């Protein structure tokens, strides 16, 4: 699965798996962008995925190590996610994966270095989504 096709697989993944993938994106992968996020679990505990995911993403989007870059990246990720025409929690997972991926390249990188980092982040996302989907009985 390539990074361009990640959005094609998200609608096939159950909500619990999307929740796990989004958590991984915001808690683990975002660290590569120096975005260390600790959710307020008291506001998330015992919520079903349909409620949990938007609340987690809302908390995460308030953490902005570089507000200007985060704003630009959010706009780019949102525009790209809109083009994929997903719905429900799949569009949230698509947006979050794009947002985190585009936050990773640091300022001062050459275009080649940035593209390499984006490719690695995409591959990592694809591997993690496949791993989570397999755990939930979904094969791509």
Image (cartoon, rainbow, N blue to C red):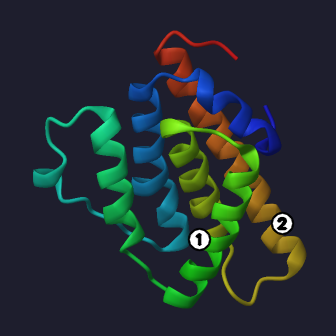
In this rendering, the label closer to the viewer, 1 or 2: 1
Q: Is residue 29 left or right of residue 98?
A: left
Q: Is residue 82 left or right of residue 51?
A: right
* Of 95 and 17, the residue lying toward us: 95
Check the image and report above or below for 134 versus 36: above
Residue 136: where, in percent of width, then height? 46, 15
Disc nearer the start of the sequence (1/2):
1
Instruction: Name the residue at 74% across, 45% down.
Output: 84
Q: Secondary structure at mark 2?
A: helix
Q: In the image as oriented, which residue stretches furthest toward the left?
A: 42
Q: Which residue is mark 1?
A: 74
* Of 24 and 93, the residue lying toward us: 93
Image quarter where the N terminus lies is top right
Check the image and report above or below for 77 versus 28: below
Instruction: Name the residue at 69% across, 87% down.
Output: 107
Q: Which residue is mark 2?
A: 115
Q: In the image as oriented, which residue stretches furthest toward the top?
A: 137
Q: Is residue 24 left or right of residue 44?
A: right
Residue 104 visible to the viewer: no
Q: CA distance from mark 1 to mark 2?
A: 18 Å
> In the figure, residue 45 lies in which quadrant?
top left
Image quarter where the C terminus lies is top right
Q: Secondary structure at mark 1?
A: helix
């Amino acid at each position: 699965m390539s990074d361009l096709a990640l959005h094609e697989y998200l609608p096939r993944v159950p909500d619990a798996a999307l929740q796990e993938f989004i958590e991984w994106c915001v808690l683990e992968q975002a660290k590569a962008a120096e975005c260390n996020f600790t959710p307020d679990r008291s506001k998330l505990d015992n919520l079903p995925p349909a409620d949990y995911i938007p609340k987690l993403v809302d908390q995460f989007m308030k953490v902005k190590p570089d507000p200007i870059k985060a704003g630009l990246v959010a706009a780019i990720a949102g525009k790209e996610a809109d083009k994929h025409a997903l719905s429900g929690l799949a569009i949230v997972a698509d947006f979050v994966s794009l947002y985190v991926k585009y936050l990773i390249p640091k300022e001062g990188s050459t275009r080649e270095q940035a593209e390499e980092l984006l490719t690695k982040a995409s591959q990592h996302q694809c591997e993690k989504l496949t791993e989570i989907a397999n755990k939930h009985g979904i094969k791509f």
